[in-house]
Amino acid sequence: MRNWPFFELSVTTPRIELRFPSVADLDELAERAAEGVHEAGVMPFVFPWSEAAPADRARSTIQYHFRQWGELTPDKWSLNFVAVHEGQVVGTQGIMSTDFSVLREVKSGSWLGRRFQGLGIGTEMRAAILHLAFEGLGAAHATTEAFADNPSSLAVTRKLGYHDDGITLYKRQGKPVVSRNFRLPRADWTPAPGIEIHHLEPCLPLLGL
C-alpha cells in the first residue's frame, strides 16, 4: 500500500516472523488474547486488560492496534507487530518512540500466548526488534521495563545484555508495585545471527527518518 507501507514491513529470524499485521492477523492475535496470556493470580500489565472476559480481551486487542495506527506520527510512533511461529500468530512485539529523530531511543513491549511460552520465542522476538531498532533505524539506546515479580520477562532482558536503569513505581490493582527499568546502548548490543529486515525503507519518512 503506497500510503501506508508498514503493511509490507517485517523482520525474520530462523524461527519466527515479526510482521506488521493485517486485519486477519489481528483477528488471530485476538484469539491468542482470548485464550490467555498468563496464569491466574499474575498481572504483568499496569492496565489489567487481560483480566477481562475472553471476548472483551479479544476486542480490546484489535482496538488497541487500530488506535496505534491512527495515532502514528513522525514525532511519536508505536509499531506493533504480530509474531508468527510455524504459521500461527503467537503473540505481539512492539517498539515505540517519541522524538526518535533527535533522541534515537526506543522502548519495547510484548506479550505471548500462554501456550507458546517457555519455548524461547519471546527471546527471539526481542532479538528481532532490537535488530530493527539498531540495525534498521539506527537507534542509540533501547529500553524496556518489567515488574519485579515477572521473572520470565526479566530473564529475557538479562539474556540480551541490558543494564539496570532504575525503578518506577506504579499502582497495580490498587497496590504499589515496583517496575524495573533497563537500557541497552548500541555499543553493548550483540546482533543475533540470521535476522533480516524487509521493506523498511518506504516506512522511514513516516517515522521521521
Image (tube, grey):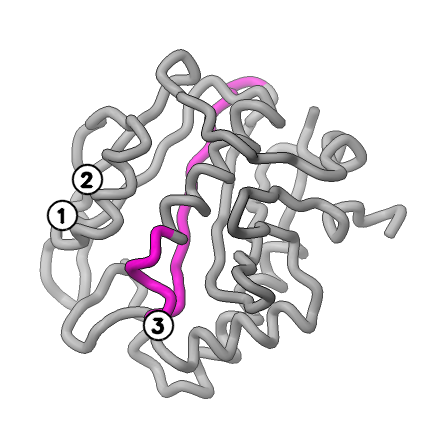
Q: Is residue 189 magenta?
A: no
Residues marked 1 and 2 touching at CB (< 8 Å) = yes
Distance, label 1 to label 2, CA atoms, is: 6 Å
209 left or right, relative to 81: right
Residue type at mark 2: give it.
Arg
Distance (Cα) linking label 2 and label 3: 26 Å
Q: Which residue is mark 1?
A: 148
CA distance for labels 1 and 3: 23 Å
Q: Secondary structure at mark 1?
A: loop
Tag 2: Cα neighbours inside 10 Å, few (<14), some, or many (≥20)? some
Categorize mark 1 by other alpha carbons within 10 Å: few (<14), some (14-19), many (20+).
some
Amino acid type at circle 3 is: Arg
The percent coordinates of residue 44 (x first, y second) are 25, 60
Tell me the kind of residue under disc 1: Ala
Q: Position of residue 167 (x, y in %)?
A: 17, 36
Decide if residue 203 is on the left or right side of residue 187: right
Q: Is residue 114 rendered magenta in the image? A: yes
Q: Circle 2 sits on which residue?
A: 180
Disc 3 marks which residue? 115
Q: Nearer the viewer, mark 2 or mark 3?
A: 3
Residue depicted at x 61% and y 33%: 75
Instruction: Identify the residue at image location x=58%, y=38%.
Output: 76
Question: Residue 166 or 195: which is nearer the viewer?
Answer: 195
Number of other residues with Cα within 10 Å of mark 3, as a class: few under 14, some 14 to 19, many 20 or more: few
Q: Which residues are magenta?
A: 102-120
Q: In the figure, is residue 88 to the left or right of 182? A: right
* Secondary element type, mark 2: strand
Query: Which numbered disc flags the more N-terminal residue, 1 or 2?
Result: 1
Number of labels in the image equals: 3
Q: Quadrant of the C terminus?
A: top right
Q: Nearer the viewer, residue 76 or 18?
A: 18
Earlier residue among tags 1 and 3:
3
